[in-house]
Image (cartoon, helix red, strand yellow):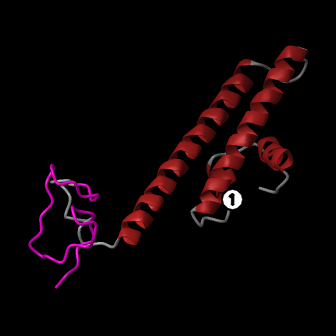
Amino acid sequence: MRIIYARCENERPVHDPQHRHSRHDPCSVMYNPMSRDFHLHRTPVDVLNYEIVEEQAAALGRMGRALEAALAKLREFDAAHRRAGAPASAQQARRTMVMQAGHALWMFVVQREACGLRDSRTVIRDYSVPGECAGRGAATHGGGI
């Protein structure tokens, strides 16, 4: 006999293998007709772990896109402005963009480390992160990237 962990009317695990969940069932297990009953054959801890990993992956994607956007903004600025002899306002704007890219890099590296990916050198190489951005993120947050 398989125990189906669900919160139904009696607030206890359901021991009936014929028990089926429907859209109108007040169970805490979500009904999805397209799933292969993932939630029904797993313990609550398995479901929670799955959702945690799912959120970690989504956050990693968001941080990666934020880093790409910050680096693209910096590259566009560099292409439009020459560095030597630039006015003070342009230099300050570039410093701000370097700080933003460094912060985005730091956020991405932290999220990667939370997912178990420890080597940040691949990020710096694959995203072509300028050295000044990598140094800025580490200096701002008191750590090394």
Estimate the x, y position of residue 41 in percent, counting from the top left.
24, 72
Q: Quadrant of the N terminus?
A: bottom left
Which residue extends farthest bottom? 1
Looking at the image, residue 65 lies above or below residue 23: above
- Quadrant in the picture for the C terminus: bottom right
Q: Which residues are magenta?
A: 1-30
Residue under the point 82% across and 17% down:
90
The residue at which mark 1 appears reads as: 120
In this rendered view, identify the residue nearer to me: 113 or 4.
4
In-image side of 118 versus 47 (left or right)? right
Seen from the viewer's position, the closer of residues 63 and 70 is 63
Q: Nearer the viewer, residue 2 or 67?
A: 2
Image position, residue 103 (x, y; %):
73, 41
Report the residue at 15% width, 60% height from top: 21
82 to 3, vertically: above or below:
above
Three-letter amino acid code of the residue under disc 1: Ser
Which residue is most to the front?
A: 10
From the viewer's perspective, is 41 left or right of 129? left
Q: Is residue 13 above or below residue 37?
A: below
Q: Is residue 92 magenta?
A: no
Q: Position of residue 57 (x, y in %)?
A: 48, 54
Give the overall secondary structure of the magenta segment.
loop
Q: Secondary structure at mark 1?
A: loop
Q: Picture quarter containing residue 144?
A: bottom right
Residue drawn at point x = 66 percent, y = 65 percent: 118
Mark 1 neighbour class, 10 Å CA radius: few under 14, some 14 to 19, many 20 or more = some
- In the image, is residue 12 part of the stretch drawn in magenta? yes
* Nearest to the observer: residue 31 or residue 76: 31
